[in-house]
Amino acid sequence: MIEWLKRRVPLRPGESRLVFSLGFILFANYAAMGITKVVSVSGFLAEVKDHYILLVWAIDMVLLILATGIQSLIVDRFDRVKLLGGVLLVFVILYAALPLTFLSKSFPASISYTLIYLLNDQQWRFFPVVFWILVNDIYEPATGRRVMPIIAIFAFLGAIIGLGIGALDAKLEIGPVKLLLLNASIFFLACLTAQFGLRTVKLAPPVRTQTTMKETLSEGWEFIKTIPAFAWSALGMLAAGSVMTILLYDALSDAKLNLGSGFQSFYAQYNLAIAFASIFVQGISAKLIERISLKRSFLIQPFVMLGSVIANFFIPGYVGSSISQGVSRTTYDTVDLSARKAFQAMVPNEKRGRVSIFIDSYLPSAGTIIGSLTAFAIITLGLQFGFTRGQYTLVYLGVGIALALVAVYAAFRVRATYEQSMLSWQLKRRTRGASVLDKLDFGEDDK
């Protein structure tokens, strides 16, 4: 299969070993996430009322912010290859330990499924930041634009394999203990790949400064807010996190209500469909961004989200809400992610980690907290005052529409301030990347 891929992807001599090593590590992460994603969500919803998952999401994001604060202290100071290996090893240990909670008769199943979900979501937010910062360090922007979409495809392949196993669990009842041990094995193979497949990677020495977490985070935020395009992008990510949360909850609650015991099988197949669609969209994302220019590509996700929430508002039911959320998720994980990574490649190496953490971790996490608590409060008040499900659903979807409009406005401001931002001295890069801006057509006039 590797030889078949080599003949069909735009890799140059000597690039394939590193690209496929990075690809397998990404594959392992998303395969493990796919396996436990379906099991954790369906298991949790089977144990408690569906809207309580909103509180789990909020708690999850608080934990992620704390974990990311620690991550921000080390991401720009330590060898990033070793850092990636360390993260993989931690996941091996955690997935090997979690089965003990299911084997203990005194441990509530609802708590066990909650712990799996929390780990799964931390993995979804935490790992990509470390991984893509390393990839940005390895490849200069021109090469990165060519190989990053290839590496990203492995994420979708991993998700398909993992979700496929999750779908089998719905029919064969493999059980959480065996699935968790399988995840531990997958991450162990990823550890070996990082150890031997990335040993030839040579990066600039890390910046070893003695600063506090507050100082580190302040530096990252100061960088973002002093460059207009980054500041507006930050607002857009905050709004996007809230809207995506509302869309996801609406889809999950509708499906659980309508499908009952068939939810796990549906959820696995639904996520498989998103993964397949993402592979296709990822394949054209680089060409799409190049055709419309980077600054305009930031408009795609906000308009997709706005259309999705409006569709949910006027077309109730799990089929409509699932399609709306799936379209938004696919766009977010492909075109929008590629645009953000290309944008972040302009940040100097010594600050890229902290800036990426703010944009890709802190802001979506804060947005998730806002969306989760807002929806939970609306549902709780609705139940208290005797509103029907359809009535309080329209209220939180109305909030989603307002937040999507904020994201649209922020995207227009990113486009309007793009050229001004590119003149900032803080975005100056090493000489070999000087001509890349012209190649990417970043300074194209508005049409």
Image (cartoon, rainbow, N blue to C red):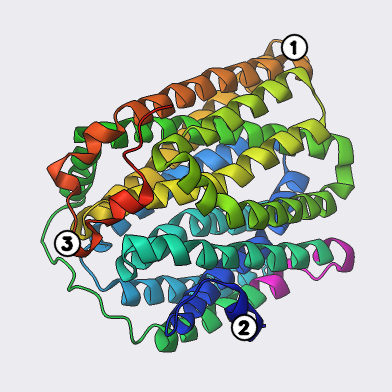
Residue 369 at least partly seen: no
Dot 2: element: helix
- The circle drawn on residue 2 is 2
Residue 266 lies left or right of residue 219; in this view the side is right
Say which quarter of the image contains residue 321.
top right
What separation in Å lies between label 2 and label 3 (alpha carbons)?
A: 34 Å
Q: Residue furthest bottom?
A: 196
Q: Which residue is mark 3?
A: 431
Frontmost residue, 146 versus 148: 146
Residue contact at pointers 1 and 3, CB within 8 angstroms: no
Query: What main secondary structure does the magenta stretch of the protein show?
Result: helix
What separation in Å lies between label 1 and label 2 (alpha carbons)?
A: 59 Å
Q: Which residue is mark 1?
A: 386
> Which mark sits nearer the N-terminus, 2 or 3?
2
Dot 2 surroundings within 10 Å: few (below 14), some, or many (20 or more)?
Answer: few
Say which quarter of the image contains residue 224.
top left
Mark 2 against mark 3, which lies toward the viewer?
A: 3
Magenta extent: 169-180
Q: Amino acid at mark 3?
A: Thr
Dot 1 surroundings within 10 Å: few (below 14), some, or many (20 or more)?
Answer: few
Frontmost residue, 419 versus 192: 419
Frontmost residue, 288 versus 363: 288
